[in-house]
Image (cartoon, rainbow, N blue to C red):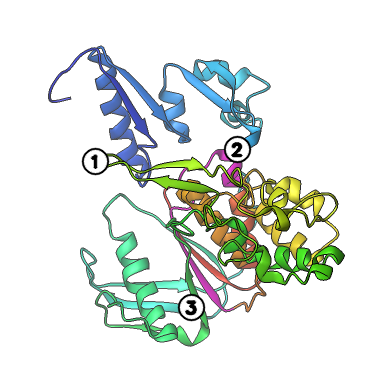
Amino acid sequence: IGSALQGVIYVLDEPSIGLHQRDNARLLTTLKRLRDLNNTVLVVEHDEDTIREADYVLDMGPGAGVQGGSVVSAGTPKAIEKDPLSLTGAYLSGRRAVQVPTKRRPRRHEGIWVRGATGNNLRGVDVEFPLGQLICVTGVSGSGKSTLVNDTLYASLAKLLYGSQATAAPSRGIEGLEHIDKVIDIDQSPIGRTPRSNPATYTQLFGLLRDLFSNMPESRARGYKGGRYSFNVKGGRCEACEGDGTLRIEMHFLPDVFVTCEQCKGRRYNRETLEILFKGKSIADVLDMTVDEACDFLSAIPQVKRKLDTLQAVGLGYIKLGQSATTLSGGEAQRIKLSRELSKRATGRTLYILDEPTTGLHFYDVERLLIVLHALVDTGNTVVVIEHN
């Protein structure tokens, strides 16, 4: 704005992330000033205020991942609202809505009290976190939400329960910790940093799939054990790419380039391993399925089905089981972590902390996410969410 350039296309990817409504209104005013200087502002967004303020909207879909890739609707926000094919339009017009609970959970007597928190800009605050509730911590950007929840509450609990070495933000003390036996911070950091990490390995589904294939009659006749179907050890994997499915070519002075392995064609396993089939599919074929496809294909195996159901519950039916962790967004990584927690046996004494879980989520995905968060609370757990949504 200060440079007063004209004829520029500005591209912004989710600029409303982490902004309170007050700050978002200021951001939108700024973007409109850029437009009025005779520029074009292109914004990738799910934020309702941003969509309503736009001059022209492109609605992509109809679903996510393999179910997406089309322009469902295009035009003014009013035109999108009237389009019966647009899921975004259905939420904008009020035909669909993220449902608000008709009644709230009764308060339990137990709670966690943070006394005299003074980290960063906190001014000696006393705060109660009632247990067995879905708690939202909100406020303008920079007001101290993350300091209170992550740096004070989580750091103190992690030190007590797990012997964490991280230093908690200063406070006079925290009471009521005896009511909690587990604290889990479900953030948006990657579930792995190598191509070998994927949703199947992270949710421990991969071990069940390896057991399934190692118990096939042909596999047992050949003496193949579960390790044969791992791409982390020698034996069953393609040795040309060491089970990555891709080869990294180092480009001096440029980012590395990844190309599909010529020998296995990206399937990660050698020919002998791929000869073992379950219902006509090899383990590489199963890893190439989406969660929705695998749910139908593996519906007869209860343990596998349960893990796949939790991935569907968090709205990740479109991702592939063997999709590289490096290609997943922060929101997808967070929901994979949520699904793993959902598949565990509930103790009813766990505190979950989520920092802006609706980041990058459409109205429809927010609706699905809330169902999952309420399910965690309904089993007696406590969920603390830092949010502006």
Q: Nearer the viewer, residue 154 or 107?
A: 154
Question: Which percent across, then down, holds residue 295?
Answer: 77, 52
Identify residue for label 3: 111
Identify residue for label 1: 253
Disc count in the image? Answer: 3
Give the quarter of the image for residue 237: bottom right
Determine if residue 176 is in view. Answer: no
Q: Is residue 183 above or below residue 209?
A: below
Q: Earlier in the sequence, mark 3 or mark 1?
A: 3
User: Which residue type carries mark 1?
Assistant: Phe
Circle 1 Cα neighbour tier, 10 Å, few/some/many (<14 / 14–19 / ≥20): few
Magenta residues (range) = 349-367
Q: In this rendering, which labeled residue sits more in front, label 2 or label 3?
A: 2
User: In the image, is 322 to the left or to the right of 155?
Assistant: right
User: Which residue type carries mark 3?
Assistant: Gly
User: Which residue type carries mark 2?
Assistant: Gly
Circle 3 Cα neighbour tier, 10 Å, few/some/many (<14 / 14–19 / ≥20): many
Task: Measure the C-alpha gap from mark 3 to mark 1.
Answer: 55 Å
